[in-house]
Image (cartoon, coloured by chain):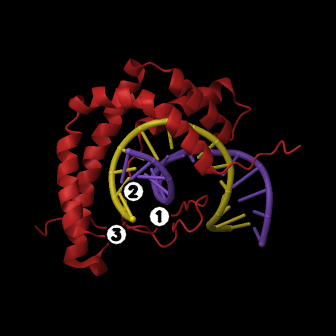
Chain colours: A red, B yellow, C purple
Amino acid sequence: MGKKAPKSKKSLSASASVNGTSRIAEKKKLLRPKSPEKMKMTTRQTTRASEKQKKPISPKKFKANPKKKIKKDGSNTPKKPPTAFFFFLEDFRKAYQEQNPDVKSMRDIGKACGEKWKIMSYEEKVQYYDIATEKRAEFEEVMAEYKKKQESGEDQESDDYSEFNE
DNA sequence: TACCTGATTGTTCTT
DNA sequence: AAGAACAATCAGGTA
């Protein structure tokens, strides 16, 4: 039989999302008041609506192929910050490798990490959420300047972070 | 040699 | 409201 189930990432994600939506929804509620995301979101939406610009995606990472993800970042566009889960994954990965040095594939680690993430308590997750929230704030700032540069002159974009063009 | 793939959840955006 | 897409990692596989 088809032991190999080429499940599309979509299917898995969809299932996971549906199952975790309710659970995570509660956590988010608790986190919401903790971080002024709402305020930022409003600002972001306003900016976005005003800009009405399409998503700045790199030509290389064009998602024509949903499964393909480019690793090369040849674009100066600030990448999305890692989520709380990713921070946990980074830490979990180290611990997992120590206990399972034989397992090198991130696939297995991802599974184990996801499973543990679900059994983790909110208190344990909240610390990662807090980090992610902080990173998000920085990302917004970086993105704001990045947009500014684009308006100023994207052709002049360089690896120098001279943002004195206020 | 170099890039793509897989697998996880979270956030954000789009329609 | 709901779905789609992308974020990092890292070793293996392919051209």
Residue count near mark 2 (Cα–Cα under 10 Å), binned few <14, some 14–19, many ≥20: few
Report helix, strand or loop for mark 3.
loop
Determine which of the numbered discs, if any, sits on residue A79 in the image: 2
Callout 3 crowding tier (Cα within 10 Å): few <14, some 14–19, many ≥20: few
Residue A162 visible in the picture: no
Q: Which amino acid is tagged 2?
A: Lys
Give the SS element for disc 2: loop
For marks 1 and 2, give the one nearer the viewer: 2
How far separated are the C-alphas under marks 2 and 3? Answer: 15 Å
Query: How far apart, in angstroms, are the residues tagged by discs 1 and 3?
Result: 19 Å
Which residue corresponds to the image point at 22% horizontal and 64% vertical from the top-left?
A: A49
Locate residue A125 relative to residue A107 in the image: left or right. Answer: left
Residue B7 percent location from the top left of the image:
64, 42
Q: Are marks 1 and 2 in contact (CB under 8 Å)?
A: yes
Give the x, y percent position of residue A76: 37, 66
- The three-letter code of the residue at mark 1 reads Asp
Task: Give the residue pinned by disc 3.
Answer: A54
Look at the image and tell me in which quarter the N terminus of chain A lies.
top right
Tag 3: residue type? Lys
Check residue A138 in the rendering and tell me which mark sits there, or answer none: none
Badges 1 and 3, same chain: yes
- Identify the residue position indicated by label 1 in the image: A73
**Where is residue A96 shown, x and y percent of the image?**
61, 28
Judge by depth and name the residue closer to the eye, A100 or A40: A40
Number of other residues with Cα within 10 Å of mark 1, as a class: few under 14, some 14 to 19, many 20 or more: few
